[in-house]
Amino acid sequence: MIIDASTPPMGTVRTWLDYRAESESVAFTFPDGEADLTWAELRETAKSIASGLVATGVSKSESVAIVYPNCRDGVLAIYGVLYGGFRATMINLVAGKDAISYALEHSEARFAFVHDSAVELFDDANGTAIQKIEIPLNAPRIDIYDLSPEDDALLMYTSGTTGRPKGVIHSQASLLAGGWTTAIAHELGEHDRGFCVLPVYHINGLCVTIIGALVSGGSIAMCTRFSASRFWQNAEACKVTWFSIVPTIVSHLLHGDIDPSAETKARIRFGRSASSALAPRVQSSFEKRFGIPIVETMGLTETAAQILSNPLPPAVRKIGSPGIAYGNDVAIFDADFQLCERNQEGEIVVRGPNVMKEYLKNREATRESFAGDWLRTGDLGRMDDDGYVYVTGRLKELIIKGGENIAPREIDEALYSHPDVVEAAAFSVKCDRYGETVEAAVRLSEGSQVVEGVLQDICQQKLGDFKRPDRVHILPELPKGPSGKIQRAKILSML
């Protein structure tokens, strides 16, 4: 199968895995010590798991919970469920008991693959008597269900920061399209090896790396979790050619004291950043220090990850923008759902083969999320004359101070301009005088002596007195979701 940049991949995860299995090449390698996994072995085990699930009585498109961190058996479980025509229901291991209990119950899963390290967590959250099952390496081969591109493939829950999590359903086709948008934007091929340190129970880790490798034919080095002290060492040992991380990891590597070898820097074509905005100063400083270009991107759970990406060097990368559309259409709509003119701010919308089928058991939310065939992202932005999108904020995160809209991101970027700021997030606080006012929280590099007033002054110098935060809280850690994205909504409750 050849990747066509103009046409999304045809078929299903099963047909693509069958094709990749014709090669004995390595699909996954695990620097934490587990044995390599070839495409052929992955396909045979996936077949066995699919047969075992059918024999257990699991119906086609039924939810099967996967409660696993990044590891070899986790990859096998995911592919086994997808190969068999079931709905892979990814459970966020750091979402907390209530969110996990909700996902297990709402998904109506009757069976779950549970990693040894997650048994206690699962048992504590499992209020619906879901049965734990083992990966059947030698299950009897029986007929498995026929599969079509429109059949359900994935169920993944949103973070739920503004209410109950929503269950996003992707088909076999939209899941493959999610890997395809990554592959064509980054020109991935069979000789590429990606570095996965993001959790695969998040859409970035799952689609960008696991499905991206399936579509491109490359391979993945998968770590159990991100480690700043071992990141470059593992990248060198596994001979990776690209990596996918988030802005907080970019910042942590930048503030670390370990550099990659010259050979590793020469081998890595690019690093990919997604899940939240990357501060321009952080990106520029990273590239200057390490000599590795960072490609900023943007994606959603509802779009099987990527919708926008900057082109690879030597094409134009615009610092501060997540780039242009690859494999789907992106536009900016005004409040009346009409197309905005170039450089006019509005809501970012997207349509294409990677867009979700629906929210599970939530027709109202599904309906409200679409304007015709355009998915509303909830992100505010503008598109320049070259088609590059600039994200200016979230509709639900805007700080409205005295009737004026303030995007938290501009406060973040002002704070990131100080070299000691590792993490930053602005947020709103209720105020009798203005309705809402601005505060922010930061994490500083170890040993930093920077005080609150210095950071407030930076914001005032860059943005003016009106947008100067009333407080800048210096914290040891900012709350983050499974992808490493800072969760603004949780900061105030922490304080």
Image (cartoon, rainbow, N blue to C red):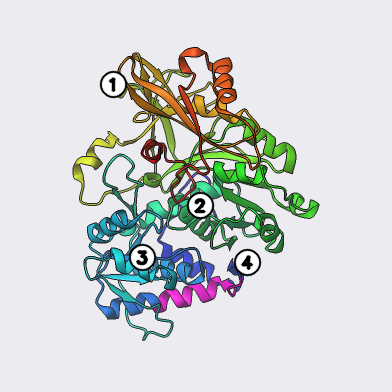
Which residue, given by chain and number where applicable, does mark 3 sit on?
A: 121
Q: Residue 113 in the image: x percent, y percent?
A: 36, 71
Q: Secondary structure at mark 1?
A: loop
Magenta part, dominant SS = helix
Q: From mark 1 to mark 3, how far is it between C-alphas?
A: 45 Å
Residue type, numbered disc 3:
Leu
Marks 1 and 2 close (CB-CB < 8 Å):
no
Q: Nearer the viewer, residue 266 or 44?
A: 266
Note whether 483 is above or below 326 in the view shown: below
Lower position in the chain sequence, tag 1 or tag 3: 3
Residue 381 on the magenta segment? no
Indicate which label's residue lies in the foreground, 2 or 4: 4
Note whether 12 is above or below 438 in the view shown: below
Marks 3 and 4 close (CB-CB < 8 Å):
no
Splitting the image into 4 quarters, where does residue 479 fall?
top left
Indicate which label's residue lies in the foreground, 3 or 4: 3
Callout 4 crowding tier (Cα within 10 Å): few <14, some 14–19, many ≥20? some
Which stretch is magenta? 33-48
Query: Which mark, residue 164?
Result: none
Q: Is residue 318 visible?
A: no
Marks 2 and 3 close (CB-CB < 8 Å):
no
Q: From mark 2 to mark 3, how far is it between C-alphas?
A: 27 Å
Residue 45 on the magenta segment? yes
Marks 1 and 4 close (CB-CB < 8 Å):
no
Quarter of the image with the C terminus is: top left
Which residue, given by chain and number where applicable, does mark 4 sit on?
A: 31
Q: From mark 1 to mark 2, how far is it between C-alphas?
A: 33 Å
Which residue, given by chain and number where applicable, does mark 1 sit on?
A: 336
Q: From mark 2 to mark 4, how far is it between C-alphas?
A: 19 Å
The residue depicted at 56 percent of the width and 56 percent of the height is 197
Lower position in the chain sequence, tag 3 or tag 4: 4
Q: Residue 351 in the image: x percent, y percent?
A: 37, 38
